[in-house]
Amino acid sequence: MFFTVLMGVLLLAVLGVLIAGMVGMVREGDPRRSNRLMQWRVILQGAAILLFIIMMSLLRS
């Protein structure tokens, strides 16, 4: 149950950072901020994939 909730939180965080980065790009804001947001998106996506792999490993055993 804990992993499922954590996965949901991570996916919502990825979505939030993605939307914030896209809005910043559309408004032609600071490119450094947009770049930092996209870096955070990649980090959060990696964490979500890693958690998914851990969940699948635990379910398999």
Image: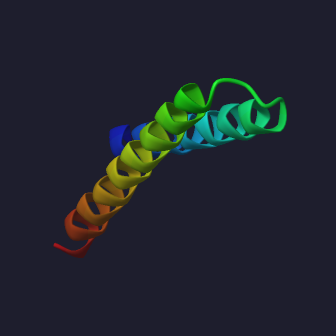
Q: Can residue 5 be seen in this view?
A: no
Q: Name the quadrant containing residue 57.
A: bottom left
Left or right of 61 on screen, residue 23? right
In this view, 24 is above or below 59: above
In this view, 60 is above or below 47: below
Q: Which of 51 and 29 is in front in this view?
A: 29
Left or right of 8 on screen, residue 2? left
State the residue lying farthest toward the left: 61
Q: Name the quadrant containing residue 14.
A: top right
In this view, 46 is above or below 58: above
> What residue lies at 54% left-to-right and 45% top-to-bottom?
11
> What residue lies at 56% left-to-right and 26% top-to-bottom?
33
The N terminus appears in which quarter of the rendering?
top left
The C terminus appears in which quarter of the rendering?
bottom left
> What residue lies at 35% left-to-right and 44% top-to-bottom?
3
Task: Pinpoint residue 53: horizontal percent, then vertical percent.
Answer: 28, 65
> What residue lies at 35% left-to-right and 38% top-to-bottom?
2
Q: Is residue 23 visible?
A: yes
Q: Which of 37 and 6 is in front in this view?
A: 37
Task: Pinpoint residue 31: horizontal percent, then vertical percent.
Answer: 61, 32
